[in-house]
């Protein structure tokens, strides 16, 4: 590991010199734990599936990075798996909350936002998938996935277009839903917390017959809650039943339905620089400030989805898989916000505009796969060929206009209600299909991963021009598996992302984003342990990246080429059977290499140079009474810039904690994030606005298992 880190041209020599010592210490402690409890390891960990439950914080396998059930240590790519236990212990209320302790990730990249889960991976917005199928097309037109419905969250870092087609150069998130299990389990959960959060959730799974041919699961959520921003709510209803038919060991078919309705408002206030990170005559604007109008503002979403996942092992060589989803979502998005986001001459008020958007999106996705495991002489192959397809239809009505100004220090609401006359937007149809092939070739301790894909994308806008894009993307990776659990690797991968829409000034279609990345890393997992240490350096570049137009803030241009070089260190350690530790460090060096004069040579907006986090949890007894647990975490996010290197958003250090007690079938947990209730800003952009981070949140949870 010293060679990998020290050879990289970053000024991180102290960290590089310390890494071998840390690895040695963690390895010794983990090995001692294994020797003491060797008889407890075998059953649950050997039956782990790459898309199934994990006992503890450390997953050993994943399907997301290769679409085959592959050990993480054998994958030539940086992967972080956030398990169900970890989501629960850290009290993650949203997907972006769960990303806080992951290397290379910037959770809540655009602050506390009720409209979606914003994040950056390696400085780029990731593409989100659910159970291996892309979850959405466009933005602000679907519901947010609730963490309670998930078994795990997997962060695949770097380009993955070879397998998934249109996806970000920075990486992707694959959200893995809870599936029916063979063991009967039931959980009833009650929550109460900050901002009058009241939630009840239920999860039940098990067999429907004596021989386990039919398995079921039902997940349900009801929430009534306010938020840290005045006049906004965060209510939710979720019903997610699923059924598995497994007539024999060779065939498995799972159907999952999801019905969700969210009743909320908009919490992104686009507050101006002055009064947030910059001084203002009347002081700092309150983070609770609501810039829209009560009674008018809403962000309400409805979604219905049906997913089918089928797997059929024909023989010892061939396995066929088919994943399908139909999804329909409706959104009513009404808001007012300051524009331009600048304090007026009186240093108190901001001009506002109002906007109404009511999109309806229907998406069909399919992924057909054939996997073959065979040998050619001394070479062992896992060959995967696939064909995937996605088709979406978007219908939308819109309206917008100028609203009355608002005093940000002493707001008076009810002075303006727009006369809304919705206009039909041209219908938009997007079709994508891809053909891909991957071979994982093993020779003794060497593992070579090769992949190639051809993509076709077709976008049609009613009454407008047809946009067709195609690309060939690939990846190659080489891993060496030492017998002691060390696995160095090197990989190269590419990405391809069509951009839907037109440049408002030139009226020309955008060119597709094209990216590539080199990655060099090492993974260490001592045999038989529940510890995983990883280190990676990478260099990614993206062409045709979108950025704000300096001449027109309402327009978006393509800024030539941007690059990000970085270092990621991540450690998940089971120090003892009752003590878990997570530690991360990230260094990102970003730059816009070609583009507008105001941005060329500058750092990419919102990308901090340094990030680090540490989480630890310990389970213990008091006076001989077992069942107690306590955890604590610290998160550091370094300073970032506005995209022109003119305005810096200060760094932030936040503290989290948890206390728990379990007795028989009951479990009680108290989670607190941002303990000091610090007001901070996650990013400020050159167009003039800043985004407020999450204030202190305390949530008490009581769970009953039966």
Image (cartoon, grey):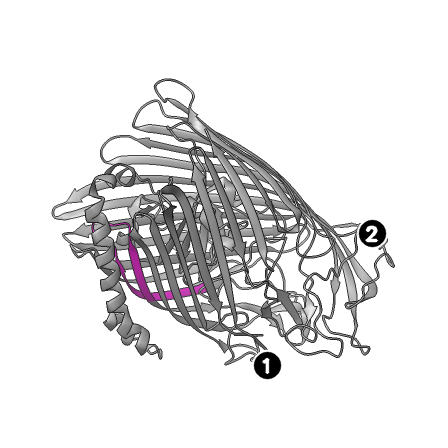
Q: Residue at x 29, y 38 (%)?
A: 44
Left or right position of 409 against 506? right
Quadrant where the C terminus sits is top left
Q: CA distance from mark 1 to mark 2?
A: 38 Å
Q: Residue at x 62, y 67 (%)?
A: 556
Q: Residue at x 46, y 52 (%)?
A: 173
User: For numbered disc 1, what is the local secondary structure?
Assistant: loop
Magenta stretch: give its range: 514-536
Q: Nearer the viewer, mark 1 or mark 2?
A: 1
| Residue occupied by mark 1 | 646
- Total marks in image: 2
Left or right position of 584 against 36? right
Q: Position of residue 595 (x, y in %)?
A: 54, 77
* Residue 533 inside the magenta-drawn segment: yes
Q: Position of residue 95 (x, y in %)?
A: 52, 51
Sequence-wise, the earlier of marks 1 and 2 is: 2
Q: Which mark is residue 613?
A: none
User: For numbered disc 2, what is the local secondary structure?
Assistant: loop
Q: Using a 10 Å C-alpha cutoff, classify the residue at mark 2 as few (fewer than 14 neighbours), some (14 to 19) or many (20 or more).
A: few
- Residue 531, visible in the rendered structure: yes
| Residue occupied by mark 2 | 420
């Amino acid at each position: 590991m010293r060679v990998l880190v020290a050879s990289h041209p970053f000024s991180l020599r102290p960290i590089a010199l310390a890494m071998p010592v840390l690895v040695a210490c963690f390895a010794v402690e983990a090995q001692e734990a294994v020797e003491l409890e060797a008889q407890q390891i075998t059953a649950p960990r050997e039956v782990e599936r790459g898309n199934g439950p994990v006992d503890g914080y450390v997953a050993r396998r994943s399907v997301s990075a290769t679409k085959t059930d592959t050990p993480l240590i054998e994958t030539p790519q940086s992967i972080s798996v956030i398990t169900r236990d970890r989501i629960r212990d850290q009290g993650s209320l949203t997907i972006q909350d769960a990303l806080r302790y992951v290397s290379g990730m910037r959770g809540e990249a655009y602050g506390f936002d009720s409209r979606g889960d914003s994040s950056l991976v390696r400085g780029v917005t990731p593409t989100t998938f659910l159970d291996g199928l892309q979850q959405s097309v466009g933005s602000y037109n679907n519901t947010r996935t609730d963490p309670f419905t998930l078994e795990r969250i997997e962060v695949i870092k770097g380009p993955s277009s070879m397998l998934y087609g249109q996806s970000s150069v920075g990486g992707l998130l694959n959200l893995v839903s809870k599936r029916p299990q063979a063991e009967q389990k039931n959980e009833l959960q009650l929550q109460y917390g900050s901002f009058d959060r009241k939630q009840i959730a239920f999860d039940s799974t098990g067999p429907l017959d004596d021989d386990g041919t039919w398995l079921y699961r039902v997940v349900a959520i009801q929430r009534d809650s306010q938020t840290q921003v005045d006049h906004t709510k965060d209510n939710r209803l979720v019903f997610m039943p699923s059924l598995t038919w497994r007539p024999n060991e060779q065939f498995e078919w799972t159907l999952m339905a999801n019905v969700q309705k969210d009743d909320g408002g908009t919490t992104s206030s686009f507050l101006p620089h002055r009064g947030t990170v910059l001084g203002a005559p009347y002081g700092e604007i309150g983070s609770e400030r609501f810039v829209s109008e009560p009674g008018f503002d809403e962000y309400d979403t409805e979604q219905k989805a049906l997913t089918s996942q089928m797997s059929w092992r024909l023989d010892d060589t061939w396995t066929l898989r088919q994943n399908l989803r139909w999804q329909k979502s409706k959104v009513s998005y009404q808001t007012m916000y300051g524009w331009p986001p600048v304090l007026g001459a009186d240093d108190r008020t901001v001009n506002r505009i109002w906007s109404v958007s009511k999109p309806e999106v229907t998406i069909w996705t399919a992924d057909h796969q054939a996997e073959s495991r065979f040998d050619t002489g001394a070479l062992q192959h896992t060959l995967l060929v696939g064909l995937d397809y996605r088709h979406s239809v978007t219908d939308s009505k819109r309206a917008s206009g100028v609203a009355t100004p608002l005093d940000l220090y002493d707001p008076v609401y009810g002075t303006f209600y727009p006369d809304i006359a919705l206009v039909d937007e041209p219908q938009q149809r997007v079709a994508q299909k891809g053909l891909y092939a991957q071979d994982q070739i093993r020779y003794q301790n060497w593992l070579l991963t090769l992949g190639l894909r051809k993509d076709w994308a077709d976008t049609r806008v009613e009454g407008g021009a047809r946009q067709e894009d195609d690309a060939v993307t690939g990846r190659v990776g080489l891993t060496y598996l030492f017998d002691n659990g060390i696995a160095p690797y090197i990989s190269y991968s590419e990405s391809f992302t069509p951009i839907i829409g037109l440049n408002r000034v030139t009226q020309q279609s955008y060119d597709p984003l094209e990216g590539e990345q080199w990655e060099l890393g090492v993974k260490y997992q001592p045999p038989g342990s529940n510890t995983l240490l990883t280190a990676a350096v990478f260099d990614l570049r993206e062409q045709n990246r979108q950025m704000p137009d300096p001449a027109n803030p309402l327009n978006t241009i393509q800024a030539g080429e941007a690059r990000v070089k970085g270092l990621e260190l991540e450690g998940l350690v089971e120090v003892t059977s009752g003590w878990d530790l997570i530690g991360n460090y990230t260094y990102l060096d970003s730059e816009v290499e070609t583009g507008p004069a105001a941005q060329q040579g500058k750092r990419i907006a919102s990308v901090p140079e340094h990030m680090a986090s540490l989480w630890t949890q310990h389970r213990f007894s008091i006076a001989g009474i077992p069942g107690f647990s306590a955890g604590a975490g610290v998160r550091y996010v370094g300073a970032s810039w506005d995209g022109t290197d003119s305005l810096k958003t200060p760094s932030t250090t936040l503290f989290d904690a948890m206390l728990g007690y379990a007795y028989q079938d009951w479990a009680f947990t108290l989670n607190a994030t941002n303990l000091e209730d610090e007001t901070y800003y996650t990013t400020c952009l050159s167009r003039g606005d800043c985004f407020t981070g999450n204030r202190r949140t305390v949530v008490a949870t009581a769970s009953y298992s039966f």
